[in-house]
Amino acid sequence: MKDEILKALESMRPFLQSDNGDVELVEVTEDGIVKVKLLGECKDCPLSVMTLRAGIERSLMQQVPGVRRIEAVK
């Protein structure tokens, strides 16, 4: 599952980078929780929660079966 998640994140990366942000995979738990670290402008953006939920989480859940939730870590 980790390789599928990395591939999905790669497809999202250009959109994040266009706003001077990025995302890094930190951990994938056995129960489908994906932990990521927001980087660059995404780290401090007031809309980062919306980016995380409406963008990254929704896309990951569609592309990778077994993903249940995404969490941002510092």
Image: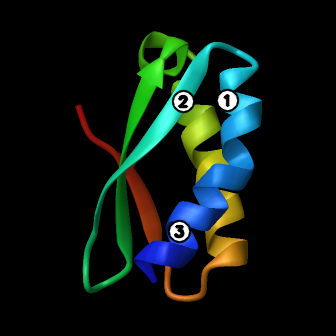
Q: Which residue is mark 1?
A: 16
Label 1 – label 3 distance at C-alpha? 16 Å
First in sequence, mark 3 or 2: give its number.
Answer: 3
Residue 65 placed where, x, y %? 59, 87
Three-letter amino acid code at disc 2? Asp
Sort mark 3 into few (<14), some (14-19) or many (20+) by Cα contacts within 10 Å: some
Question: Which residue does the image show at 70% across and 75% down from the upper left?
Answer: 63
Question: Which residue does the image show at 61% across and 65% down from the upper left?
Answer: 7
Secondary structure, mark 3, is: helix
Q: How is the image coloured?
A: rainbow
Q: Tell me whether the residue at label 1 lies in contact with that at label 2, contact meaning CB atoms closer than 8 angstroms.
A: yes
Secondary structure, mark 1, is: helix
Question: Which residue does the image show at 60% across and 54% down from the upper left?
Answer: 9
Label 3 – label 2 distance at C-alpha? 15 Å
In the rendered image, the quadrant that contains the C terminus is top left
- The front one of 4 and 53 is 4
Residue 18 placed where, x, y %? 76, 20
Q: Which residue is mark 2?
A: 22
Label 1 – label 2 distance at C-alpha? 5 Å
First in sequence, mark 1 or 2: give its number.
Answer: 1
Q: Which residue is mark 3?
A: 5
Three-letter amino acid code at disc 1? Leu
